[in-house]
Each structure stands twice: as C-alpha cells, then as structure tokens.
Image: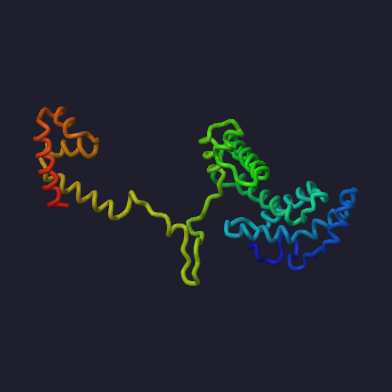
Amino acid sequence: MVNKVEICGVNTAKLPVLSKKEKEELFRRIKEGDMNARERFIHGNLRLVLSVIQRFGNRGENADDLFQVGCIGLIKAIDNFDLTQNVQFSTYAVPMIIGEIRRYLRDNNSIRVSRSLKDIAYRALKVKEKMTASNLKEPTVSEIAKELDIPKEDVVFALDAIADPVSLFEPVYHDGGEAIFVMDQVKDTKNSDETWLENIALNEAMRHLEDREKYILNLRFFQGKTQMEVADEIGISQAQVSRLEKGALKQLRKFV
C-alpha cells in the first residue's frame, strides 16, 4: 500500500523538493504569519512523511491513514521548530512524525489498554526522553519509576501494555532463501509432542505400582517432601521409605 503513487489525493511521484535556502526563506515568512508560505513548506516536506510511513508498511495499516497522521506530526514539527537551535528541520521533524504515528497505532490497537495504564506509559516515555537528553544515556526502569514516584512494576507493566504487537508471520531474518518468521522462534516447552508422550508413558507406568508406592512417589517428587517427612506421614521408618521409593522407581524404568 505504501508503494502506490497516489496517497490521500497526493501524487507522490511529483512531490517538490525544497532547497535549504527555500526552506529558510519560507520559515521566516511562516513565523511572520504567511499562510501561503506555510502551505508551500508543508507540501515541500511531504516526502519526509512518505519516507517515515514506509517503516510501518508491514503492519497492515491503510497507507492513506498513516499518511494523514504523519502530516499531523509534520505540522506539529513546523509549529514547534526553532531556527535558532542550528538543527536541520528533517532531523527534528522525523521523530515527531514517527511519534505521532506510534500514538495513532497505540490508540487504535485492537488490544484495549486502560486509560490509566496509557497515562503512566506516556509519562514514563516523556521522563525517559527528558533523562536521556540531560544524561546522554537511557535511564533504567528504576530511575524512571523513582522520577515518577511510582512502583517499578507499574512502569514495566504500563510500557508492556502499549508495546506494538508483533505478527507471528513477521520476518526476522532473510538470507536470500526462505525467510525465518517470528513463529519459527516461538517454542512451547510445556505442550510439545515429546512432553505429551512422556506424560502418557509415565501414567501408564504408574498403573503397575501399588497404591502405597504411588503415594510415596507423589509425596516425594510432586509435593517435594523429604524421606523423613514421608516416613512420619505414613507411619513407617525412613529406611522403609527409601527401599519402597527405590523399588518403585526401578519398576517405573521398566515401563517408561
């Protein structure tokens, strides 16, 4: 979708490119309230929006919607840009456009997140940006939580809640042959075929044991009790528990 020529009625193949001198002149006029200069400046920077939305092309979102949201980010960047900072406009605008699109994707996510969680997450992101800028390094979750005066667990939970979902069919590696997808790296260690077969074999083997042997193995290996504790519970000596346990395990090995 993001590769089509026309988006929101705009022919992307004919978008103008402004020179540095033209940008500076238009910006000077914008600050003086010239709306025509503002329109020209927006139109001359739509290629920035187009380049940004291509980063989100694998999410199945409508390109026209992303383009419109990106334009909002572009306009916000124009309104807040300061010429005296000696920074190129594109350097300032691209993060603004990306941020606007990410907010749109979070707010329109099919997974509903409570407003309170979103508020904590957005506050945490603002603190993270502020601390990164002042300390020239990303703060830890503990530092963010301390700045917000809330538990660290709340920050982690909130940030996880607004994280963009990843498709199982999203490629993570491509070597020229078949791609490796996220689903190829996901493994269920609890419900594998091997585990099911082992459980079936163990249940079948347990049927060959006497009731007291089953009870001892249950106390020892499923409830984590010591041989002495088992002995006290069933009223026999620890030596007898040890003998019965060894005999039961030996019997199990014959059938597993």
On screen, 3 above or below 216? Answer: below
Residue 117 place in picture, x, y as percent: 57, 37
On screen, 239 above or below 22? Answer: above
- Asked which quadrant contains residue 8, the reply is bottom right
Is 105 on the left or on the right of 196, as rendered? right
Q: What's the residue at 16%, 45% (across, down)?
A: 206
On screen, 143 above or below 192? Answer: above
Residue 47 place in picture, x, y as percent: 74, 61
Q: Nearer the viewer, residue 82 or 117?
A: 82
Residue furthest front as drawn: 135
Residue 169 place in picture, x, y as percent: 49, 59
Locate the N terminus and report the quarter of the image it occupies. bottom right
Residue 209 place in picture, x, y as percent: 11, 43
- Asked which quadrant contains residue 16, the reply is bottom right
Residue furthest bottom as drawn: 176
Q: What's the residue at 53%, 40% (across, down)?
A: 156
Q: What's the residue at 53%, 43% (across, down)?
A: 160
Q: What's the residue at 68%, 49% (across, down)?
A: 100
Is 148 on the left or on the right of 172, as rendered? right
